[in-house]
Each structure stands twice: as C-alpha cells, then as structure tokens.
Amino acid sequence: MRNDVTYQFHHLGIPTREVREGERYSPMYGMYTSDTACELVHIQYHRFDADSPLHVLMRTVPHPAFKVDNLAKAIDGKEVILGPYEPIDGFRIAVIVDGGMPIELIETALTDDHIWGRAATGKRAPLYAGSNPHRHADAAIITRGAAVRTSAKESAGSEGRASGARATRCGSGAAPAHRERMGGRRRERAPGKRRPPKGD
C-alpha cells in the first residue's frame, strides 16, 4: 500500500515489431495486441502502426500493470499519458510515468477470466471497436489473391451468384424463348416466326 492505495501486480505489456499469431487490432490506437502462453505472469505483446497516437514510452518501453483500489487517488499528482478510460467494459485504466517508466493502473471488479475473455474476443471491448480480430490474416489472404468463405450461407450465396452469371452468359445474344434443342443440337428461330403446322 502506498498513499492509502493498494497495488496488486496484474500483467506486463511489451512493445514488439514482430507480427504474432492471434493479433487483435485497435483502430483507436493503431495497435496490435497478442498474448503469450506464459503461466506465471500474463504477458501481452503490443505492435504499433507508424502513426499510432500513443505516447512514445508506451510504444518503446515495456510497462507493468497494477490493479488498484482507487484509480483517481493513484493518479492524483502524477503525469498521466493515457486515460483514464475503459478499454474493456468494467475495466478502467490509466497510464502514468513513474521514474521514466510507463505504468498502467487498473481499477476493476471483473475477474481475470472476464478480463482476458473480453480482450481476446473483442466483445464488450471498445478498444477494439470496429476492428476485425483476424485483420492481419485477412490481409495476407487478400494479398495472395485467395477467397475464403467462412460460412455455409456465404458459400450458398456465392454459388447462386455464380450460377446466375453462367446463365446470363449462356443466354446472351438471343432471346431464350426462341431457342430449342433438336437432335442434340441447338437451332435458332427468329423472334416472331412460327413453326408451320404438321400435316395430318
């Protein structure tokens, strides 16, 4: 406890330039975030766009994060470089500078399961609002020129559009009502011309 505020270590954020698997993108801050399999401490890697608006310390220096019981009191009189705001619903944070180091302070009643679950899925997480969690992977797929269908509905829609396109191509150049198949071959009849009646 310091200045009547309780501090509890929560996680570590590390800047990186490496593209990592499972990145989720924050359009708000031009930042990609990914997690690690480390069990002793939760570690997040952060990769930034060249024009990210975040403070240079957050983009270049690892930052420890602490849960506090009173965020307003914890940041009182400190140099605040981000927030306070809620990147995840019910998860209020601010980043201060302490001895030249960025320190993230968190006030929340959420369990870690809720926190990391919302962060991973982007649900109830304004930080990732408007983003595609698989943005980087999609970009790679598009670059290779591949089309990926992720649902049966999309596949069905695609088949329907393709069938329509084939039908349109096959039907171009003449009215379908004036085409018929005879003896395995197609014979064209001019519009308006009637077939003579068969004899008795």
Image (tube, grey):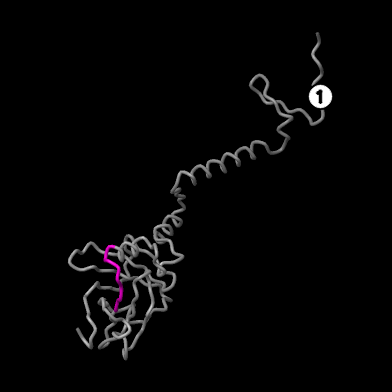
Q: Work out which quarter of the rendered image holds the N terminus and state it.
A: bottom left
**Is 164 covered by the magenta stretch?**
no
Residue 131 falls in image quadrant = bottom left
Q: Which residues are magenta?
A: 105-113
Question: 51 left or right of 97?
Answer: right
Q: Residue at x 38, y 69 (%)?
A: 89
**Dividing the image into 4 quarters, which one contains the C terminus?**
top right
In the image, 151 versus 135, the foreground residue is 151
**What residue is rendered at 41% in x and 76% in y?**
52
Q: In this picture, is 84 found above or below 183?
A: below
Up-down: is 138 above or below 156?
Answer: below
The quadrant holding residue 55 is bottom left
Disc 1 crowd rating (10 Å Cα; few below 14, some 14-19, many 20+) is few
Q: Is residue 61 left or right of residue 175?
A: left
Residue sitting at the far bottom: 77
Residue at the outermost left position: 40
The type of residue carrying mark 1 is Arg
**Left or right side of 90 for 151:** right
Against 113, residue 56 (above or below) is: below
**Relative image position of residue 104 (x, y in whole percent):** 29, 78
Viewer-side residue, 81 vs 186 = 81
Q: Which residue is mark 1?
A: 194
Judge by depth and name the residue closer to the eye, 162 or 78.
78
x, y (%) of residue 63? 27, 77
Q: State the image quarter where residue 66 is shown.
A: bottom left
Pinpoint residue 28: horizontal percent, then vertical percent. Answer: 44, 72
Residue 87 coordinates in the image, percent (x, y)? 38, 72
**Secondary structure under badge 1?**
loop
